[in-house]
């Protein structure tokens, strides 16, 4: 009798293990599908987001909510970055700035400093016409981080944009200086101009 109980216990344990393994595998498969969806939506190009901001925003908000539910912070950061573009093109400036700041904070938390630094530089570009002081502040934040990536395209683009900001402020010498710094990096990287 004890042998039969032992076999029943073993069969029961085996069934539990198989069932538990199936649930875990199914959950992982569901998470993988969700992350695949998030990464696909976050792969929208700048051109797509800015020419179809309403449509892009619907998908990006879904990706953001799903990323949040999975605690997928990189997915959240990228979705917020792109939502910022859409909001900007829809004229929702305050929302755009808030979304971009949230994305930068997540990039910093994830130690994705190149993305964080360029986020500050893009934010400076976004606010430049409403506040030169804020543009200066954000650009300096960006440069402080991007100096760790001296040959990056992101630093070159930040220098170029800062040169244009200086030109808009009628600071021609500074504009030339920063645009030339951008060109130096681009030429060193054999980037097309």
Image: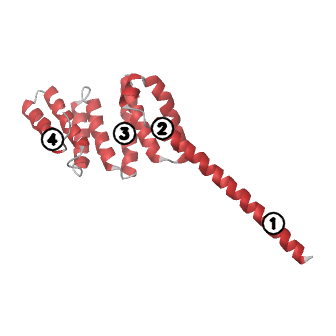
Label 1: which residue?
A: 11
Up-down: is 15 above or below 150? below
Q: Distance of mark 4 from mark 2, alpha carbons?
A: 33 Å
Q: Distance of mark 1 from mark 3, alpha carbons?
A: 55 Å
Label 2: which residue?
A: 40
- Determine whether the residue tagged by mark 4 lies in a helix, strand or loop: helix
Work out whether mark 4 precedes mark 1 in sequence or the reverse, and give the earlier one.
Answer: 1
- Determine whether the residue tagged by mark 2 lies in a helix, strand or loop: helix
How many residues crowd around disc 2 within 10 Å: few (fewer than 14), some, or many (20 or more)? few
The quadrant where residue 50 appears? top left
Observer-nearest residue: 165 or 59? 59
Work out whether mark 3 precedes mark 2 in sequence or the reverse, and give the earlier one.
Answer: 2
In the picture, measured across the screen, residue 94 lies left or right of residue 23, that is left
Q: Between label 3 and label 2, give the one nearer the viewer.
A: 2
Residue furthest out toward the right = 1
Label 3: which residue?
A: 101
Q: Distance of mark 4 from mark 1, alpha carbons?
A: 69 Å
Work out whether mark 1 precedes mark 3 in sequence or the reverse, and give the earlier one.
Answer: 1
- Mark 2 touches mark 1? (CB < 8 Å): no
* Numbered marks: total: 4
- Determine whether the residue tagged by mark 1 lies in a helix, strand or loop: helix
Residue 57, image x, y percentages: 47, 28
- At x 38%, y 45%, the residue is 105
Up-down: is 87 above or below 111? above
Label 4: which residue?
A: 187
Q: Between label 4 and label 3, give the one nearer the viewer.
A: 4
């Amino acid at each position: 009798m004890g042998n039969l109980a032992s076999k029943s216990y073993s069969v029961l344990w085996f069934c539990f293990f198989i069932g538990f393994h199936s649930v875990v595998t199914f959950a992982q498969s569901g998470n993988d599908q969700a992350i695949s969806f998030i990464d696909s939506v976050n792969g929208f190009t700048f051109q797509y987001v800015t020419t179809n901001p309403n449509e892009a925003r619907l998908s990006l908000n879904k990706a953001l909510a799903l990323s949040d539910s999975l605690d997928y912070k990189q997915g959240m950061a990228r979705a917020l970055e792109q939502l910022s573009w859409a909001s900007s093109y829809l004229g929702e400036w305050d929302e755009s700035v808030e979304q971009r700041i949230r994305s930068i904070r997540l990039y910093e938390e994830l130690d994705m400093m190149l993305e964080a630094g360029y986020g500050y530089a893009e934010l400076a570009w976004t606010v430049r016409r409403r506040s030169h002081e804020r543009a200066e502040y954000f650009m300096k934040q960006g440069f402080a981080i991007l100096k760790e990536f001296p040959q990056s395209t992101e630093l070159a683009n930040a220098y170029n944009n800062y040169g244009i900001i200086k030109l808009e402020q009628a600071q021609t010498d500074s504009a030339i200086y920063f645009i030339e710094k951008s060109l130096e990096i681009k030429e060193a990287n054999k980037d097309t101009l």
